[in-house]
Image: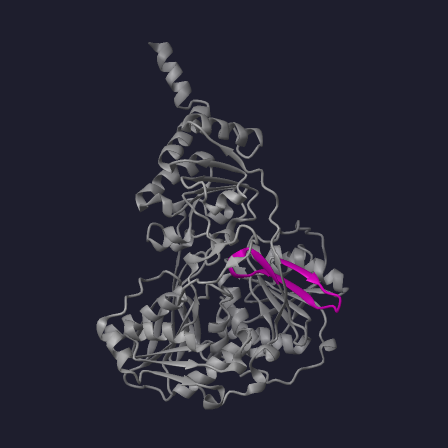
Amino acid sequence: VIGGPPGIDPPRIVVCIKQVPKAQELQVDPVTQTLKRVGVPSEINPPDANALELALALKDRSGAEVVVLSMGPTSFDESLERAIGMGADRAVLLTDRILGGSDTVPTAYALSETIQKIGGYDLILCGEETTDASTGHVGPGIAGHLDIPQITYVSDVRVAEGKIRARRTAEDGTEYWETGMPALCTVNFGCNKPRAPTLTGKIRVKRGGVLVHWSCADVGIDPKKVGLLNSPTIVAKVDTIKLPPRAGRLFTGDVKDAVRALLEALLGDGVIAP
Amino acid sequence: MTDGHVLEDKSHFRGVWVFLEARSGGLRDVSTQLIGEARRLADLRGMPLTGVLPGHGVDPLAEHAIGYGLDRVLVVDHPILDIYRSRPYATVMAQLIRRHKPEIVLFGASKNGRDLGGRLHAILETGLAADCVKFDIDGEGNLDMIRPSFGGKSLAHILCKKHRPQMASVRRNVFVAPPHRPDRTGEILHESIELSPADVDATLLEFQEFTNEEGLRPEEAAIVVCGGYGLGDAKHFAMLQDLADRLGGAVAASRKAVDSGWVPKMLQVGQTGMTVRPRLYIAIGVSGAVQHLAGMQESEKILVINLDAKASLFEIADYGIVGDLFEVVPELIRQLDELKPGGVASRGALAAEAR
């Protein structure tokens, strides 16, 4: 019932990406203690870029159609176009006002429906988590919705004879898993170096016809299952963290003297043992 | 494969559950840490506290877990549950939750805990808050799930008002494990869940355990020496290791240092890495992006060494030296050696006497 017709040739890989504010650019306003978001440039969520690179490497190795999928406002086109520039074949943006405020439950549902609308798929790749919301729930949520195998936190995936082999990083070691297709993997942040867009890729974007926008109605998404009001969780309020007061003792002057004074303080406070 | 969207009366849901994650014959420490906090929540709600332990041959572990403060443990014993597998574990949890209707379910935010929670919340169509650092019960009896929002500089209060169970995950070392009382008694209930070989949709071919050659893990160390982008090159981490060795600590790294390929990802502290709360956190050449703070701001004491006096990490430092790390760190190592009995200084003195 679920998944695509088996044995699509070449295999189709759907990569789910999100556009996020550029992490390195984020600074805290020292006065208000809130994040300065205004004017912060966007990027493909870095773990998603690793997922995309993994898909493109699979395409290079043995051929695949790479479809990039995102859900969000039309400003996300920027990241989808970049993904095509990097070598993805086409992109789908699920964009609809009624999706606004969706938490991970409707998001996983809406993306699952859109993946099915794309048609058959052999492999779905997501980043391990986003750098903004940082839950890591959407990837496994999609696998749960589609009722397909999932392998999370992978740093490499190989496809052979209709099966997937994935290298998973657990806390205490490396696991090597094998599963059938279709399947979903979430990809470790930093496991590869995402390639830069190429000129050929940019020309494909310019020529057009590689990026489509779908609404919920286009996909057949139930409006009663998405959006803020249909999300199980709400953010009731946000508090600024009051960090415990820190001593903030600065040791200055000649390096020797500063280090000596520092060590005296650390020893005196019992932070390190003599 | 989901539960559909008909909401069941939430008054039918009672009790607090903790998912107990077994690993190499023991309980993951995040599971025992969770029991303490879950006990507090169960008492606030006046409800029993249940541990849920899927596995194979895990009765002794269930007995042991009770000692941390559980009232009962639901054990699902099946050969295919001998190791963590996404689908069978999600099937077991979903069926148990539908059968017993707990009000609150807590998971450790380990790799497996997140893998399970993410799949399960989509199947049950209920709320799951990731990486909570604090819990409360609000005026209406809802679980107030408090987690760092983007970058960790503020805390978001997440509520799941209409859906049950309310689910949340918690990272390792956020709560402190309660003392173990072997004399504590509790009930062990064996639950049967129908599982078939078809539930094993993925096979573990091989497991290579990380060797402990790299030494102490930052999460376990009382002193963490963290290197950032200011180190400039992978080779300079050797100097940090020298410092860590003298302090009995462990080396960690900022995301930018990991991104640069200088050290493995498993040493990364911060939002997309690990959370540490050592007695002393030494940040060297780390500017202190908000994502970094999220992983270390609970450290008891923070020492910052940075050339840039404006590095934001100085704002939360207990001790700071503004200076070139390539001068400060070697000097720190040298003076630490002098402090040690039989260190450079005393050896130097002996040598002088011998002359």
Image coordinates for residue B152, horizontal then vertical, percent: 54, 56
Say left or right for B68 vs B113: right
Image coordinates for residue A202, horizontal then vertical, percent: 26, 74
Does B205 sit above or below residue A114? above
**Displayed quadrant of residue A239:** bottom right
Image coordinates for residue B245, horizontal then vertical, percent: 42, 37
Query: Which residue is pictured at 60% across the width and 66% down the height?
Result: B168
Q: Is residue A237 located in the magenta-colored stretch of the structure? A: no
In the foreground, B33 or B306: B306
Say left or right for A250 vs A63: right
Does A60 sit above or below residue A248? below
Q: Is residue B136 located in the magenta-colored stretch of the structure? A: yes
Query: Magenta stretch?
Result: B134-156
Does B245 sit above or below residue B74? above
Does B202 sit above or below residue B293? below
Say whether residue B255 is visible.
Answer: yes
Say left or right for B159 vs A148: right
**Displayed quadrant of residue B300:** top right
